[in-house]
Amino acid sequence: MLNLKLIPPGALIGLFLCAVFLFVAVFARWVAPYGLGEIVGGVWEPASSKYLLGTDNLGRDLLSRMIYGAQTTITIAALATALSFTLGSILGFAAAVIGGWFDTIMSRFVDLLMAIPTLIFGLVVLSVLPSTILTLILVMGLLDSTRVFRLSRAVAVDINVMDYVEAAKLRGEGTGWIIFREILPNALSPLVSELGLRFIYAVLFLSALSFLGLGVQPPAADWGGMVKENKEGIVFGIPAALIPAGAIAALAISVNLVADWILNRTTSLKGGRG
Amino acid sequence: MSPIVKLIAQRVALGVGLLLAVSVLIFAGTQILPGDVAQSILGQAATPQALANLRAELGLDQPAYVRYFAWLGGILTGDLGTALTTRQEIATTLPPRLWNTLFLAFWAAIVAVPISIVLGLLAVRYRNGPIDKAISGFALASTSLPEFFIGYLLILFLAVKVQWFPSISTVYDGMPFLAKLHAIVLPALVLVLVVLAHMMRMTRAAILNVMQSAYVETAELKGVGQFDIIRKHAFPNAIAPIINVVMLNLAFLVVGVVVVEVIFVYPGMGQYLVDHVAKRDVPVVQAVGLIFAAVYIGLNIVADVAGILTNPRLRHPK
């Protein structure tokens, strides 16, 4: 059982904030005081007891939109991360186990994809694809799977030469067994902390796309898009755009704190991987 | 031919080959749609005539590889094509914007590189102490902050509240140099803050790596002071990895400008790209995407070559 006192304070804060964000995202409909597109007051009203964070550029309640935005942002980022992880790790493990031409082709292709900055290639592809949430998840997930591929291939190459994997191969197990029953369980701990980093990256990437007007399209709300909606207010000294931007930062920092802690914990457990 | 020249020639050739492959990928990236590109650009309401015109203009009646070689041939001869939306030659609208972007990235780099190397050295000198902790805490925070958070925070305080700098970075031809610098202070500052932490952390890691070598231990046992060990023994051997770090971050700077340019409405290449992605202006997107990729790959080659040149073992092979 985990002893709460053993968790460093940074990680504890991170865990707490993550839990809050997750709770709000899941129960958005019940937590939000007003509807997503409901116009409830004047434009950019300051925070008051009625509108806890004030209102946005169209007079919608900012807090309610933040809550729905949490749902959209976290869902899309989580799905993209899930896609990049499944695809990247399975292909990475397969490349390490199968080796030969499969490994060479996959690795060179990933090198090629990584030679183009992700945001730039994402923008190139999005210039012809329809702007739907599904496209976003696919593009983000596929582009990010290159990084997971590299890590999981590197980890799997080390595990693949272990005696127990050798034994499984001699026993006549198939590639699927080797990947899922021998390599996956032993590669899990370095991958888990990477999961946190990839999730943060997905949140930041999605927010950047939405901020540029190329991500989640209105009327749906995500945090990056809300920054874009409210950015004109900044020059009048209205900080509405900073609230969703700050939420993105808070989410990213708290996930980072947790991932850091898991990484430290697992490396000290295993005596480090050098 | 000396082996080092050969090695460098190899790297450069590799880079050119990579760039060629990237051009295929960028071109293919705009062809992946299963349906009709013209339809998706113009939308469902387009008339058949408009569709046919656009198809002819994009050369969609020809197979993809023919279009690719026509495009590549054009680029190699300096013809980047024509923008669909404005009907302007891309080759004439792009260069001033490219210069603006490089201008911004250059000044950000001038500020960020020395600061991050000095802070990285300090972090190693006082490692695990409060300075090191503070620096890595700052690094953690700044890798998590989106550019627009830093950007709008700076605008709110430095442009709106105290009004030291403009909130919109307008630059134009023939603008006095100092006025230009004044206009880009805020975007450059955002870029500095974004890369600083990363560069510092990698510098710290590179020097720490060298600090674990036997000759550093010998120096320590000889009684050499901590700063002298870093300055005389660790730093010269860490130059190659540090140059690598700097180049990678410069590449990141040039790409990172996309969001920053949009925040400050700066007339650079990033803004140009984003505008035309929204308008689905494929020729512009392809051209700008390729140039971004070329700059990125180019800086990576420079990093490789610098790594070879500063490595004494490669410079004087046995």
Image (tube, coloured by chain):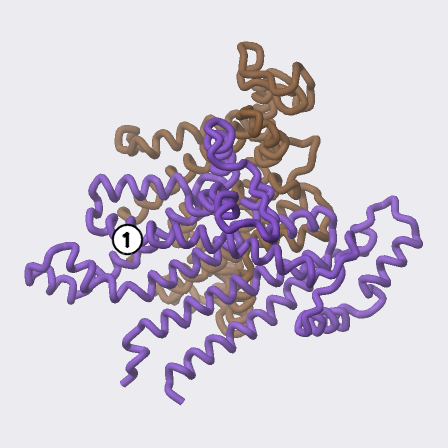
Chain colours: A brown, B purple
Label 1: few (<14), some (14–19) or many (≥20) C-alpha neighbours in 10 Å: few
x, y percentage for residue A157?
A: 41, 64
Read off the residue under disc 1.
A272
> Foreground residue, B173 or B318?
B173
Apparent side of residue A238 relative to residue B75 in the rendered image (left or right): left
x, y percentage for residue B316?
A: 28, 82
Q: Would residue A157 be seen by someone viewing this image from the given angle?
A: yes
Residue at image coords 26%, 29%: A5
Q: Is residue B40 above or below residue B22?
A: above
Apparent side of residue B188 relative to residue B99 in the rendered image (left or right): left
Kind of residue at disc 1: Gly
> Foreground residue, B198 or A23?
B198
Quarter occupied by residue A120? bottom right
Residue at image coords 62%, 63%: B290
Apparent side of residue B194 relative to residue A110 in the rendered image (left or right): left
x, y percentage for residue A139?
A: 62, 50
**Could you tell me which chain the residue with mark 1 belongs to?**
A
Quarter occupied by residue A273? bottom left
Q: Is residue B135 above or below residue A5?
A: below
Apparent side of residue A23 relative to residue B216 in the rendered image (left or right): right
**Quadrant (top left/top right/bottom left/bottom right) for the N terminus of chain A:** top left
Outermost residue toward the top? A49
**Secondary element at tag 1:** loop
Residue at image coords 51%, 69%: A103
> Foreground residue, A131 or B190?
B190
